[in-house]
Image (cartoon, coloured by chain):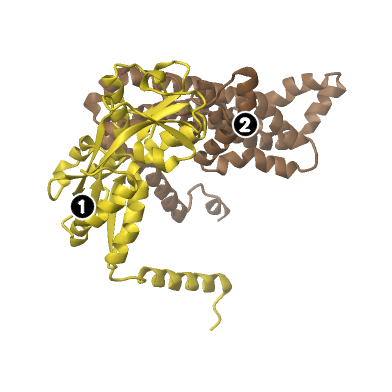
Chain colours: A brown, B yellow
Amino acid sequence: MSRRLRSDRPPLGILVLAGLAVVFFALPFAGLLWRAPWSDLVDVVREDAVRRALWLSIQTSVLATLVAIVIGVPLAWVLARVDFPFRNFVRALATLSMVLPPVVGGVALFFSFGRRGLFGQYLYDWFGIRLPFTTAGVVLAQSFVAMPFLVLTVESAFRQFDVRYEDAARSLGARRWYAFRHITIPSIRPAIIAGLVLAWARALGEFGATITFAGNLPGTTQTMPLATYIALESDPGAALILSIVLIVVSFGVLIGLRDRWLGNPHEVTRS
Amino acid sequence: MRIPKPRRLLVVAAIGLLCACSGSPDRTTLNVFAAASLSNAFTDIETVFEVEHPDVDVVLNLAASSALATQISEGAPAHVFASADEANMNRVADLMVDSATIFATNRLQIVTEAGNPLGIETLADLADPSILFVTSAVEVPIGRYTAEVLTRAELTVRPVSLEESVKGIVTKVSTGEADAGIVYATDAAAAHPRVTSVNIADEFNVIARYPIAALSTSDAATRFVTFIRSDEGQAILREFGFGSP
C-alpha cells in the first residue's frame, strides 16, 4: 500500500496542465520556424548588417553581465547579510527595473543619463561623455534591466548559505575576504552561474530600454533584437531568420550552461 | 442563498463585462491605419467624423507607414490606410478596394534643439560630423524623403540613430539628445516651441505625397475616404499645415 502511495507516477491532472504549458511555449516557435524562408538563411546570416548586429549583441550582453557581477554580487551579499534600515526599500529599488516595462526604464535613463539629463549633463559638460547613441549606452541600458536577475538569484543563495562554514574557516585563521572568496563564493557558485545566465539572457534580449535610450544605428547601437524589429518592417523574412539566429544562440547557451555547471537541482543544493 | 465574497465579486465583474459589450450595439468599428505624421490631424478628423457619422466608431492606429504596411500585409484588420508615401501604399496594393488617391502633401524642414544653439542654417551644416543628426531607415517614409533631399544637395550626413518613425526624430531633437533632424513641416510646427525649424532651400526640398485607400468594401470605409477628400476634411488638414494634393 505505502509503496503504491509513494509511486513515482505523477498525477494525470498535473501532467495535462504541464503539457499545456509546454505546448504554450512551443507553439510560437513552431509558427516562426514554419514561416521562416529557410532558403534565404545562408544569405541573410552572411549579410554584414546581421553579423554586425550579432557581434554587437554578444559584446554588449557580455559586458552588461560583467557589470552585473562586479556590482550586483556585492549588492546581493549586502542585502542578504547586512541588517540596515530601509533594506526592503533598497531591495525593491534594485529589482524595480525587472518588473517595469523596459521602455519606462529607457525613458528614465534618458532623463537621467541623457546629454540634457539630470546627471548626464554633467557627464557631458565636465568629461565630454555622452551615453545616448553610443555602445556604452547600450551596455548601460542592458545592465539596468538585467542586473536584478543576478541580484535576486545570488541574494537568495547567500541567505541559504550556512554562515557556520565561514565561521569555521575564520576560526582556523582565515581572513574575512579569504573566507568569502574561498568558502562562500564556491559554495554558491551554481546560484551565481544561474543568475549570470538569466542576466545575460535578459541583456541579450533587451529591446525597449535600448531603442529608447541608446537609439538604433547598425554597428553602434543596433543589437539583434533591434535589427529584428527594424527588419520586420521592410523584410519580414529576414526578421524571421534573425529571430532564429537569436533563438539558436540563446537556447544553445541555456542548455549548455545548465548541463555543464548547474546539473540537476539536487546537486545544486549539495555542492 | 449567500454567495461567498470572492464569487460575488466575480458575478459583479461578469455583469459589468456584459454591459460593456452591449454598450453601443449599432456603432460600426472602423480601423484607420495612418502614418505617424498624420497623428494630430487624424485625431481631429476622427472627432469631427464621428460627430457627423454617429454610427461609426473610428479607431486610429498611428505608426510609421512602413510598420503599418507590414501589419496590413500580415493580416491586421485595417479598413482604411493613409500612408506618408506611395512606396508603402503600393505594398498593400492587392488589398485595396479601389486605387489609392493622394489626399495631402507635406514639405520637409530641418529641426534643431529649441533656439538652435549650434546655429544650423542650411543643409550643408548637417554634414559637420560633430553634429548629432537623427533620421529613420530608408524603409520609413521620412527616412526615404530625407535621403532624397540629401542626395539632391549632394551631401553625406552620418546619422547617430535611425528612429522608428518621424515622431522618434522629433523626440530625440526636442529633448536635446540629438542636435538636428529632418522632419515634415507639420511635425516641426506641432513641436514648436520645443524645437526650432530651419527651412530647406526649395531646390533641394521634396514634396511628400500622402495616398489614402479603402481596404474594405464597407460603407463606413468609403464614407471616411470621401470625408478626407471633402472640403471639410481638407480644411482640417490645411489647419495642421498639410498642402493640397
Residue A9 % position (x, y): 48, 49
Give the answer, above or below, for where B88 lies relative to B181. below
Q: Residue at x 36, y 32 (%)?
A: B109
For the residue pair A80 and A214, the one nearer the viewer reads as A214
Q: State the image quarter where residue A76 is shown.
A: top right
How many residues crowd mark 1 within 10 Å: few (<14), some (14–19), many (20+)? many
Q: Residue at x 56, y 22 (%)?
A: A130
For the residue pair B195 and A134, the one nearer the viewer reads as B195
Disc 1 residue type (three-letter): Arg
Disc 2 residue type (three-letter): Ala
Instruction: Report whether B239 appears left or right of A5.
Output: left
Instruction: Report whether A108 appears left or right of A17.
Output: right
Give the answer, above or below, for where B191 lies relative to A240. below
Q: Is residue A22 visible?
A: yes
Residue B159 % position (x, y): 40, 22
In the picture of the structure, the residue carrying the numbered disc 2 is: A191
Element type at mark 2 = helix
Task: Please tell me whether mark 2 or mark 1 is closer to you in this view.
Answer: 1
Residue B158 % position (x, y): 39, 19
In the picture of the structure, the residue carrying the numbered disc 1 is: B229
Give the answer, above or below, for where B170 lies relative to A126. below
Farthest left residue?
B98
Q: Is residue A260 visible?
A: no
Give the answer, above or below, for where A24 lies relative to B177. below
Whether pointer 2 and pointer 1 mark residues with C-beta atoms closer than 8 Å, the reply is no
Measure the alpha-carbon separation of dots 2 and 1.
64 Å
Please give the chain letter of the residue carrying mark 1: B
Farthest bottom residue?
B1
Q: State the image quarter where residue A188 is shown.
A: top right
